[in-house]
Image (cartoon, rainbow, N blue to C red):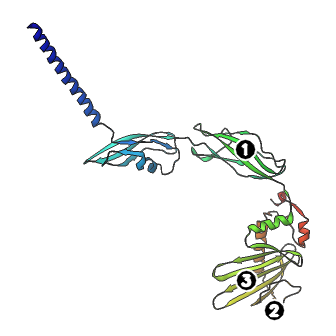
Amino acid sequence: MEEKKKSKKIVIISVISCVVVLAIVGIVCFVFLSNKEQLKLYNAKLELGKENYLEELIKEDNVYVKEGYKYSVKDSKIDINNVGIYDVTFEIKGEGNTIEEVKQISVVDTTPPTVELKQDTFYIGDNINIEEIVKIKDLSQEEELSYNEAKAKTEGQFDTSKEGESIIQISVTDKNGVTGTQELKINVKNPIVNLYDYITSALKNGKTFTDGSYDNKFVIKYNDSYNSGLSSSGWINFTEKVYYDYTKYSTSYLTTRSADLCYFDDNYQITKVYTSTGVAIDNITNGIPSGFKLQTGDLSNYQSILTGDIDRVHNLLKDKNKKINLLGKTVDQLKNETIDLRELQ
């Protein structure tokens, strides 16, 4: 009898224990489920300096939220320009409830600095100081990094002893310890070039300019088109020291032509101007063409136009020092001359 009572007591105690354990488990599960996150970020990292970073953070494929719930950013402490961990408060609405959840976001720097060359074309024999020709930029700061700040290291050195490409490797490190290696490439050219080839090549880049000749003398032709059917064409004859400008205005009712024939000296200063309205010259001829008359008085307007066109030619030839002399040159003479491009700078 005594044994039966003992067994019964053990059973009762066991049942009570199970109930207590289940109750505790239930409470724990309830608390866990009650505090379960409603929103999850698949990627809680942002790259330093990233534009539109909040859009990236909250886009649908980066956020998990319970079906039927909506989310938005209520408050953001992110400083996208500095590496660190920041809090972002999300507001989540669903099933008549509104809750807030704070997520920690990491701003990380995995992007190495970039290196560009301020100059990538050099001439044979040029001395190159790598520190002076590189531009180092990084997301970690707005200003350029100096060569020393970036702890720059190069493998090899540029070879300017011969024409062609020269390549070196440079490694740079930003303040967050991110290091990148890049290849830098320069083009080494021979500064001594054929004058005629250089001029004709440059004229092709000018679009409105072409090379030509008159009586085997070198001339530069131009043809500019403007709005409303207005165009201007002509040439500069360096041999005869003659500048010719022809302007045409055309409508459905009439066509107006004008022409100026300007003579200038060795310094491109106009000495005489002949004009004619309604006459267009297609070729320069010896003497003054029929229908033209000598202009007297103020010639500054003609001088201004001539100077502008001469400057356009010099700019096109990159002839800052005006070392290229075309006055009195024939095409054959130009083909037998050379120019040191360093003299033009």
The relative height of residue 189 versus residue 251 in the rendered view (above or below) is: above
Is residue 256 shown left or right of residue 13? right
* Cα–Cα gap, marks 3 and 2: 16 Å
Give the residue type at disc 3.
Thr
* Cα–Cα gap, marks 2 and 1: 64 Å
Q: Are marks 1 and 3 in contact (CB under 8 Å)?
A: no
Which residue does the image show at 42% across and 50% down from the upper left? 59
Quadrant assignment, res 168: top right
- Circle 1: is it few (<14), some (14-19), or many (20+) Cα within 10 Å? few
Q: Which mark is residue 291?
A: 2
Q: Secondary structure at mark 3?
A: strand
Give the residue type at disc 2.
Gly
What residue is shown with label 1? 131
Residue 304 shows in this picture = no
Give the residue type at disc 1.
Glu
Is residue 78 shown left or right of residue 187? left
Total marks shown come to 3
Quadrant assignment, res 111: top right
Q: Secondary structure at mark 1?
A: helix
- Circle 3: is it few (<14), some (14-19), or many (20+) Cα within 10 Å? some
- Toward the viewer: 168 or 174? 168
x, y percent for residue 233: 75, 79
x, y percent for residue 23: 21, 27
What residue is shown with label 3? 247
